[in-house]
Amino acid sequence: MSEEDRARITACPDGPLLVRGEFELLDTEGEPIPRKRRTVALCRCGLSSIKPFCDGTHKPAGFRTDD
Ligand code: FES
């Protein structure tokens, strides 16, 4: 696996977790969650209507993360 393929998780300030690289996303039953893109944004504000993905709701909701 190349360095570029390694999974990386980046916490966006006041926003989602960006996950890039090779990884598998599973639901609570252990079933794969299909994704269309190589990079996905996972909600961490809890308000998205398309969980586990971010739908941008964190912005109007004023979601804030600690420094
Ligand atoms: S982090 Fe974006 S909707 Fe929750």
Image: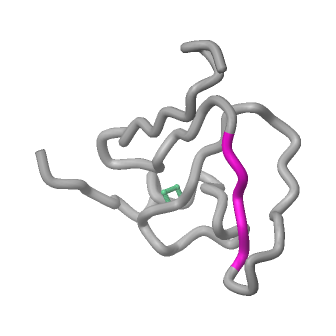
Quarter of the picture containing the N terminus is top right
Q: Residue at x 87, y 56 (%)?
A: 34
Describe residue 31's horizontal placement relative to residue 11 as left or right: right
Residue 33 placement: quadrant:
bottom right
- Whether residue 60 is in magenta: the answer is no
- Residue lying farthest to the front in this orientation: 1
Q: Residue at x 56, y 34 (%)?
A: 7
- Residue 35: percent from the left, percent from the top? 83, 49
Describe residue 50's horizontal placement relative to residue 8 as left or right: right
- Residue lying farthest to the left in this orientation: 67
Describe residue 11's horizontal placement relative to residue 40 as left or right: left
Residue 38, compared with residue 48, is above or below; it is: above
Please name whichever residue, 54 or 39, is drawn nearer the observer in this view of the structure.
Answer: 39
- Whether residue 26 is in magenta: the answer is yes
Describe residue 40's horizontal placement relative to residue 57 as left or right: right
Q: Residue at x 41, y 36 (%)?
A: 10
Please name whichever residue, 60 or 7, is drawn nearer the observer in this view of the structure.
Answer: 7
Residue 67 placement: quadrant:
top left
- Residue 48: percent from the left, percent from the top? 60, 68
Residue 59, compared with residue 20, is above or below; it is: below
User: Which region shows up in magenta?
Assistant: 23-27
Main SS of residues in magenta: loop
Q: Residue at x 53, y 60 (%)?
A: 43
What colouring method underlies this structural image? one colour
Residue 18, compared with residue 34, is above or below; it is: above
- Residue 21: percent from the left, percent from the top? 64, 29
